[in-house]
Image (tube, grey):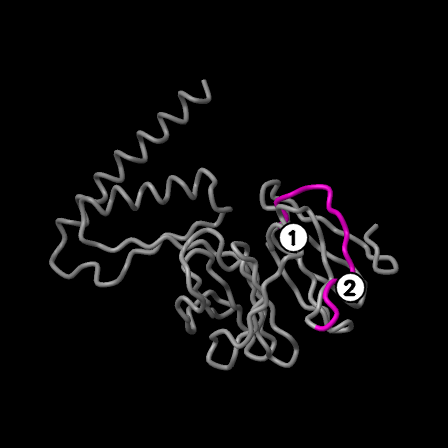
Amino acid sequence: MKKFILILILVFIFFHTFIFAKSVKKTETGFPSKPIKIIVYTAPGGLIDVTTRKFTEIASRYSDATFVVEDLEGIAYDFISNSLWIVEEENRNLINISMEGNLITRYDQIISGQDNSGLEGICITPSGNFFIIKEKNPSLFIELNSNFSSEESIEMNIADDLSGMCYDRERQSFWLVSDKSKKLFLWNKTEGIKFESNLTYDKFEGIYYIEQENDIYLVNDEQNKLYYYKLINNRSA
């Protein structure tokens, strides 16, 4: 029964893709003048991601319009400009938006490559330094310069992947989470791993540390749940 329903959904999507693409092709010359962007808000490889990419593949056959799928991953708050910075995984873009959601600026493909092993996390230190992580193949810890290109890139072999990051001002280190390895790390460039803990589940994609309370919050992408951890003497409880 579930398979039958899934087939019906796919048929419905493909039919409306065809109608949509035809309608785009019949519009006046030069419209749309910009690429049509479709934002995937779920994890890469899931049903929404796969069907969205199939949609653009079919639509491109019947239209001259350019379709772009954006997979938004990491997000960080900029205290200096009171805005948000977002990294896009596959196309390696860095996007700055206002708190109202309006585009301020964007930097396209700040590192090379174009697949589902790209940018996963971003954090900004109180002094305004930007750091990002690349998920895998290989996993990279990257410091950005003032032009928002790579200043320093460190290959990370501490886990099977890296899926989230945040900055710990008190320890001057970074909290890193690994989806595949189900691990939590406290790490810096000088000392390497300062703390490591196993996690019960995989699919942790977001992390935030509140230093005043010594609390860590982890977002599980698959379960759509927020997990809370209390650190006691640098050990999760």
Mark 2 residue crowding within 10 angstroms, few (<14) / some (14–19) / many (20+): some
Please name the residue that numbered disc 1 is placed on: 159
| Nearest the eye: 99 or 167 | 167
Q: Indicate left or right for 70 with 206 as reference.
A: left
Residue 4 in percent (x, y) is at 40, 20
Residue 76 in percent (x, y) is at 58, 66
Secondary element at tag 1:
loop
In the picture, which quadrant includes the N terminus? top left
Residue type at mark 2?
Lys
Dot 2 or dot 1: first in sequence order is 1
Secondary element at tag 2:
strand
Instruction: Note whether 48 is above or below 90 in the view shown.
Output: above
Residue type at mark 1?
Ala
Instruction: Note whether 53 is above or below 32 in the view shown.
Output: above
Please name the residue that numbered disc 2 is placed on: 194
Q: Which residues are magenta?
A: 190-204
Q: How many marks?
A: 2
Residue at 25% x, 34% y is 15
Instruction: Note whether 14 is above or below 36 in the view shown.
Output: above
Label 2–label 1 contact, CB within 8 A: no
| Nearest the eye: 121 or 30 | 121
- Which quadrant holds residue 154? bottom right
Residue 24 in percent (x, y) is at 19, 49
